[in-house]
């Protein structure tokens, strides 16, 4: 006997069962930053701080008494987030400054402002990230790699001299376990013009984050600046806002059950920025507030150096 309703019902049943398993098996919130370190008289910049992990990180820094700069593309969203954090924490030294990581001109203007007008820069959190279908930045770079890696590469280098003036400065790079899903960077197609896949390019950008962290840590070894990267875990943020709507609707219920909240997802970022426990640790990859061994391909020093050289060329960075 045919039962045309059976297939849809079976699908619903399978989804319900998977959802129940996901709920019961939901991983704990992960590591928590236990440090009570204060940030009085210190300045921190967080890119993409108007929402998600970045906003939670900014709020935490504000509670610790720091001067917190929300570096965001949207003036409206950035100013709203800054006001919300000021109201929630009682720290009036939380400000928005415009930064579009898809524009080298914007990055240079932002860095010039910081270098000229800020008395110090103690913490830089390279947090902003996106996943979109293939499009180009203002300077003609593929957007995902352009924002997630090249934009942060230029920004960080332009702020290094200011950071070197501070004692025990720290750079935190929000990478992702996604780096493990690709085995290498295709330097012959760094613009990802062939067989574009948003997820694949996102994973490449996260591998680039890891390479950048390790190479930068080596270059700053004698300057007292700690550089580390992290996987925040699966987090309910809007980084996937441009995902296919049907796929997003299907995935959303499972994300609610499986993923961390932004506050939970921000804990490792905060830990790397403030904790006394990582003094002396640089060039490492962290998950749940603890260092984790990287996959062998992420330890490719030659690839990291090559990426640095390519990044210098594509961003027009002059290192003196």
Image (spheres, helix red, strand yellow):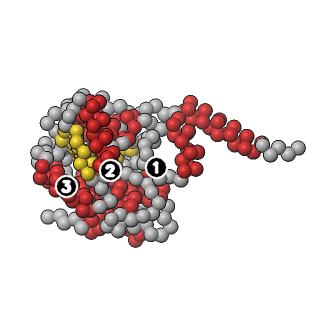
Q: Secondary structure at mark 3?
A: helix
Towards the viewer: 153 or 97: 97
Q: Nearer the viewer, residue 214 or 203?
A: 203
Residue 74 is labelled as: 2
Residue 117 vs 315, above or below: the answer is above
Separation (CA) of disc 1 from disc 3: 28 Å
Q: Residues within 10 Å of mark 2 (few under 14, many from 20)?
A: some
Disc 3 crowd rating (10 Å Cα; few below 14, some 14-19, many 20+) is many
Q: Kindly tell me whether residue 302 is visible in this rendering.
A: no
Circle 1 — which element? loop
Cβ atoms under marks 1 and 3 closer than 8 Å: no
Q: Above or below — where is 75 with respect to 85?
A: below
Residue at 35%, 38% in the rendered image: 266
Label 2 to label 3: alpha-carbon separation: 17 Å
Image coords of residue 55 (percent x, y): 33, 40
Judge depth for marks 1 and 2 and give the one in front.
Answer: 2
The residue carrying pointer 1 sits among few (fewer than 14), some (14 to 19) or many (20 or more) residues within 10 Å by Cα, namely few
- Residue at the disc numbered 3: 111
Q: Position of residue 6 (x, y in %)?
A: 77, 42
Q: Quadrant of the C terminus?
A: bottom left
Circle 2 sits in a helix, a strand or a loop, which is it?
Answer: loop
Q: Nearer the viewer, mark 2 or mark 3?
A: 2
In this rendering, does residue 313 appear at all?
A: yes
Q: Residue at x 17, y 51 (%)?
A: 114
Q: Residue at x 36, y 66 (%)?
A: 141
Report x, y in % for residue 118: 13, 47
First reached walking from the N terminus: tag 1 or tag 3: 3
**What is the x, y in percent for residue 56?**
33, 37
Mark positioned earlier in the residue sequence (1 or 2): 2
Q: Do the numbered discs 1 and 2 sit on residues whose CB atoms are within 8 Å? A: no
Query: Marks 1 and 2, Cα distance to the nearest angstrom?
Result: 15 Å
Judging by the rendered image, the residue that carries numbered circle 1 is 241
């Amino acid at each position: 006997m045919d039962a045309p309703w059976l297939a849809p019902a079976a699908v619903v049943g399978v989804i319900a069962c998977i959802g129940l398993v996901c709920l019961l098996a939901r991983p704990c919130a992960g590591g928590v930053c236990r440090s009570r370190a204060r940030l009085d008289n210190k300045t921190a910049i967080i890119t993409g701080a108007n929402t998600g992990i970045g906003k939670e990180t900014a709020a935490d820094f504000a509670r610790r008494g720091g001067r917190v700069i929300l570096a965001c593309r949207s003036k409206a969203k950035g100013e709203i987030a800054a006001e919300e954090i000021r109201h929630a924490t009682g720290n009036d030294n939380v400000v928005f400054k415009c930064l579009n990581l898809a524009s080298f001109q914007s990055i240079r203007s932002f860095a010039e402002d910081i270098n000229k007008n800020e008395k110090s820069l103690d913490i830089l959190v390279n947090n902003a990230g996106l996943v979109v279908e293939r499009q180009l930045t203002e300077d003609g770079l593929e957007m995902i790699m352009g924002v997630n890696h090249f934009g942060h590469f230029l920004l960080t280098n332009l702020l290094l001299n200011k950071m070197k003036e501070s004692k025990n400065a720290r750079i935190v790079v929000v990478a992702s376990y996604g780096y493990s899903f690709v085995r290498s960077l295709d330097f012959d197609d760094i613009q990802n013009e062939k067989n574009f896949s948003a997820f694949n390019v996102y994973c490449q950008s996260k591998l680039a984050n890891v390479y950048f962290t390790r190479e930068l840590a080596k270059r700053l070894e004698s300057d007292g600046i700690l550089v580390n990267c992290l996987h925040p875990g699966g987090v309910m943020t809007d980084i996937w806002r441009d995902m296919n709507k049907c796929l997003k609707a299907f995935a959303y219920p499972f994300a609610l059950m499986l993923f961390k909240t932004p506050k939970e997802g921000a804990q490792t970022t905060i830990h790397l920025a403030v904790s006394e426990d990582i003094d002396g640790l640089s060039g490492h990859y962290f998950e749940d507030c603890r260092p984790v061994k990287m996959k062998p391909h992420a330890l490719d020093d030659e690839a990291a150096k090559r990426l640095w050289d390519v990044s210098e060329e594509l961003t027009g960075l002059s290192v003196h």
